[in-house]
Image (tube, rainbow, N blue to C red):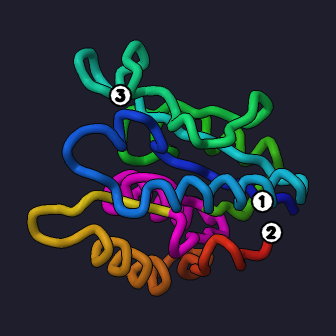
Amino acid sequence: MPTALIVIDMQQGSFAGGTPRYDAEGLVGRLNRLAGRVRASGGIVIYVQHDGPPGDPHHPSQPGWRLLPGLEAREDDIYVRKTSCDAFLETELDPVLRNAGIDRVVIGGCATDYCVDTTVRSALGRRYRTVVPTDGHTTADRPHLPAVKIIEHHNAVWADFLSPVGPASLAPCAVIEI
């Protein structure tokens, strides 16, 4: 069965401003290489973009809505728009995956503690075998915790998460089997 790589909120608005995302440049390179491997194996790459309300940097009319220019997104990749932290909620993501015969997803992107976390949990609850690249997601420092600790914490939670298909599998981008 083919695999789907789901790349969440790697949009210009997520990386702008005074709060840098942890290892953003390295993350883009790792996600590009992972996407290339998924495509080469016959899998699909899905870019999920957040649609913010009017006035928000993620509003579709704003430059912040666009994907980061360093991402090697292709015209034949799939693009899904969302309005909440859950990329499955009221979107076409689940029907796209089911129609493509996908039962295994790899989920990465931005932000670890919001949209990535919510989508990982939602995928597991929908019985998708879920893989999270330990170095395939990012967030910003928060007032209570630095980004690197947030990332470590979520990796640990997902690896021990109870779901109908078991916890998520975790491995660095470079060694995930496609």
Magenta span of residues? 107-136
User: Is 23 colored magenta in this rendering?
Assistant: no
The residue mark sitting in front, 1 or 2, is 2
Marks 3 and 1 sit apart, C-alpha to C-alpha, by 28 Å
Q: Which residue is mark 2?
A: 178
Q: Residue at x 37, y 80 (%)?
A: 152
Q: Which label is found at residue 3? A: 1
Q: Secondary structure at mark 1?
A: strand
Quadrant of the snapshot with the C terminus: bottom right
- In the image, is 119 to the left or to the right of 105? left
| Residue 11 point in image, percent of width and height | 45, 37
Q: Which residue is mark 3?
A: 58
Picture mark count: 3
The answer to which quarter of the image holds residue 107 is bottom right
Q: Are marks 1 and 2 in contact (CB under 8 Å)?
A: yes
Closer to us: 37 or 42? 37
The answer to which quarter of the image holds residue 69 is top right
| Residue 176 point in image, percent of width and height | 71, 75
Q: Residue at x 77, y 59 (%)?
A: 3
Quadrant of the snapshot with the N terminus: bottom right
> Would you call the spot at circle 1 few (<14 residues within 10 Å), some (14-19), or many (20 or more)?
many
- In the image, is 3 to the left or to the right of 158? right
| Residue 72 point in image, percent of width and height | 68, 41
> Would you call the spot at circle 3 few (<14 residues within 10 Å), some (14-19), or many (20 or more)?
many
> Would you call the spot at circle 2 few (<14 residues within 10 Å), some (14-19), or many (20 or more)?
some
